[in-house]
Each structure stands twice: as structure tokens, then as C-alpha cells.
Image (spheres, helix red, strand yellow):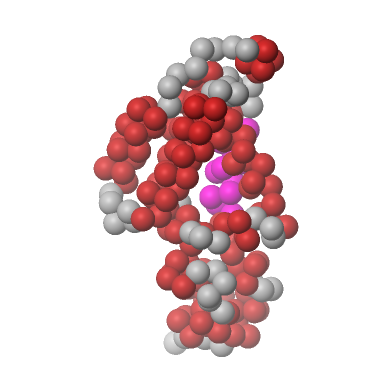
């Protein structure tokens, strides 16, 4: 039975997710993906111009949600920024934990690709929001460790149900982030 194009495209994305998670982006070839799907490499290339295009489409929903969260954080400071950033990032990480697993260990290299270059700037703004836009080292360190820990935890515990993982991460975030007094970013820089 011949597969339809959308069905084949979806199978390629699913196989790519599994292969990237198992052997990494660099360690996976288009031929590996084609073999897992049961099609030719030419079929994969018919649907995706190259491996980067495949990864870009695979990550598009997560990136869109991250961009939306980044837009929501504009103008928020102090505890409002911290709470919104923590809850939003946890929701994103839980929802897209398989995609996060794909990026494990390869994110710095992938951020060099044009399709992902803006992610670094968004993650820096996310860290600043988690710190409540404080310049205090403790707040900034806690925010960075929390971002990395949420990502790593979601990638590691793919088998933990969402309704258990999300509350555990929210509780952790509540303990890790000390509320910072509400002040404007210019006031924070003066202290």
C-alpha cells in the first residue's frame, strides 16, 4: 500500500525525532532516517531540503511557544516576571521534552545555525526574567541553573507523566527562585 505524502512526512519527522534523541543530531544521517521509515533517502529529501530543514520543522512548534512566552515577558519585572517565566518555561519544557532530548549536548553547535540563532537571545531574556531582572549574582545564577535543570530534567524523565512532572518542577522553581522586590530595571542597576 502506497503512503500519502502527509503520512510519509509525518513518519519522517517521527523517525527523525527518535534517531536524533538516540544518536544525536550529528550522529544521525538522512539515510538512517530513511531506513527507519522504510523509504529512500531521495524520499526524505523530497520532503525536506536537508537535515537542518528537518530539524527546523521538528522544532518549529517549540520555538513558536518559546517566542510567545518571550513576548509575554516583555515589560514584566520582579516576581511577576519570575512566576510567568517559570510557569511558562516549565509548560514548554514538559510539552516538548522529546524535542529537548533531541538537543541534549548539541545545543551550542545548533545555535550557530541560522534557523536557531535567535534562540540564544531568547534564552538570555528568559534567564533575566527568571532572575526578576535583578543584577544580583545569586538571582542570576539561580535562574541559569533552573533553566538548565528544567531542560535536563524534562529530557531525562521522558517517562514521568506530565501531571507529576509539572508540579514537581513548579515546586522546585518556587524553592530555587527568591522573589526580588518589584523595581524598574534602571532602579536595579543603580543598587
Residue 127 in view: yes
Q: Which residue is drawn at 65% across and 67% down?
A: 52
Q: In this view, does 12 lie above or below 141?
A: below
* Residue situated in front as seen by the camera: 163 or 100: 100
- Residue 179: quadrant of the picture: top left
38 relative to 44 in the view: left or right: left
Q: In this view, does 43 lie above or below 22?
A: below
Residue at the far right: name it: 114
Q: Is residue 61 part of the magenta span, yes or no?
A: yes
Q: Is residue 116 above or below residue 70?
A: below
Image coordinates of residue 47 in percent, x first then y, are: 63, 74
- Residue 55: quadrant of the picture: bottom right
Q: Residue at x 57, y 72 (%)?
A: 26
Total marks placed: 0
Residue 184 in view: no
Image coordinates of residue 123 in percent, x first then y, are: 59, 41
Q: Give the range drawn in magenta.
A: 60-71
Picture quarter with the N terminus = bottom left
Q: Residue at x 46, y 25 (%)?
A: 83
Q: Is residue 20 part of the magenta span, yes or no?
A: no
Image coordinates of residue 70 in percent, x first then y, are: 60, 35
Q: Residue at x 43, y 27 (%)?
A: 177
Amino acid at each position: 500500500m502506497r503512503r500519502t505524502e502527509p503520512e510519509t512526512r509525518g513518519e519522517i519527522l517521527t523517525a527523525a525525532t527518535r534517531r536524533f534523541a538516540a544518536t544525536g543530531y550529528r550522529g544521525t544521517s538522512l539515510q538512517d532516517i530513511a531506513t527507519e521509515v522504510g523509504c529512500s533517502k531521495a524520499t526524505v529529501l523530497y520532503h525536506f531540503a536537508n537535515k537542518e530543514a528537518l530539524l527546523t520543522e521538528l522544532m518549529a512548534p517549540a520555538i513558536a511557544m518559546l517566542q510567545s512566552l518571550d513576548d509575554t515577558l516583555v515589560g514584566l519585572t520582579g516576581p511577576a516576571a519570575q512566576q510567568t517565566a517559570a510557569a511558562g518555561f516549565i509548560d514548554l519544557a514538559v510539552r516538548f521534552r522529546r524535542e529537548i532530548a533531541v538537543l541534549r549536548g548539541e545545543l551550542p553547535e545548533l545555535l550557530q545555525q541560522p534557523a536557531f540563532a535567535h534562540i540564544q537571545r531568547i534564552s538570555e531574556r528568559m534567564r533575566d526574567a527568571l532572575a526578576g531582572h535583578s543584577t544580583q549574582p545569586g538571582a542570576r545564577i539561580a535562574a541559569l541553573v533552573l533553566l538548565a535543570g528544567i531542560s535536563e530534567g524534562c529530557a531525562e524523565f521522558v517517562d514521568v507523566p506530565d501531571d507529576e512532572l509539572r508540579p514537581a518542577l513548579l515546586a522546585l522553581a518556587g524553592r530555587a527562585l527568591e522573589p526580588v522586590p518589584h523595581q524598574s530595571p534602571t532602579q536595579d542597576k543603580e543598587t
